[in-house]
Amino acid sequence: MRSALAYTPRSAPLQSASPSAAIAYLGAFVLVSFLYSNPIVLTASVAGAAVAGLAAGARRAVLAALRLGLSLALLMIVVNALVTDRGVTVLARLGHLPLLGQVDVTAEAIAAGTTIGLRAMAATMAAAVYSACVDPDRVLRLLRPLAARSALTATLISRLVPVAARDARRLREAAALRGPGAAPLGRGALARRLLAGSLDRSVDVAATLELRGFGLSAAPLGGGRSSRYDARFWVAAAGLVGLAVAARLVGVGGFDAYPKLELTTGPAVLILSVATLLAGLVPLRGRRLWRVVLGRLEAARA
């Protein structure tokens, strides 16, 4: 079964756009998440990247990123609540714990952990959509004139990570089919077998690249071809980044967790969040976009 994060060729605008335009577009969501700590804006950044993936047909990648992102966010919330005792709103006193000392869980620590988790979710979502929608071979052609070896390494990583995920799934399935009488196979043993298989594959890949002359000097290839969809992604990226930076400079979307929660709301935050969310609709085809908009209007009238 094909990995959810593996690149899948499609005729959708995001897959057809040049790698530079697609990377700039998806990177805009990540930039917004790092510019702001306001949970409302961060949630809009996660949702915008997810909508972009759904609009591009990468539903499985969005679901996989959502599962991973929620796990990371929950872990960060728990860790921050346990190791940080700042804040005036104490929700629970857990007493003295080994290695941690006196642990007081505060609402401010949970809120701060939530912002970190949402930021990680936004980056994870954008990375998953990138992996599923941007052709790594075109990225290699784009970056080779600048750094041939680094471009090749990055491309191989983007190709082999989904393969490693597929191998891990097959190892788990094989371990489950061994029957109840077999000795249990722990995660350590699975990790060792996965690492051994990855090392064997890396040797085979290196030998194949050597036979094809990748170690020889050659004339650099040209960058990726432009697409008729590039303009929309460049405009969306520039507009979203410009709006986010301008709003940040004037103090929109402020958030302070310590020593007491202070969350800035208002029309400006709403406009920024809605714009970030709507930016996720850019990968839709024109006709499909109109069908979605008209369907929503008809539903609202009914």
Image: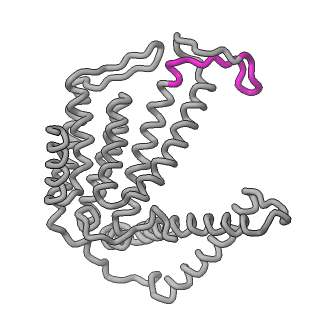
Q: How is the image coloured?
A: one colour
State which quadrant residue 7 falls in.
bottom left
The answer to whether residue 37 of the structure is visible from this angle is yes
From the viewer's perspective, is residue 283 above or below residue 177?
above
Residue range of the region highlighted in magenta in the rendering:
95-110
What residue lies at 64% left-to-right and 76% top-to-bottom? 200
Is 241 contained in the magenta span?
no
Picture coordinates of residue 82, whole percent (x, y): 63, 26
What residue lies at 34% left-to-right and 63% top-to-bottom? 133
The residue positioned farthest toward the top in the image shown = 88
Is 103 contained in the magenta span?
yes
215 on left or right of 221? right
From the viewer's perspective, is residue 90 above or below residue 268?
above
The answer to whether residue 195 of the structure is visible from this angle is no
From the viewer's perspective, is residue 292 above or below residue 268?
below
Q: Nearer the viewer, residue 66 or 200?
A: 66
What residue lies at 36% left-to-right and 36% top-to-bottom? 43
Number of numbered callouts drawn:
0
4 on left or right of 53? right
Picture coordinates of residue 260, whole percent (x, y): 45, 13
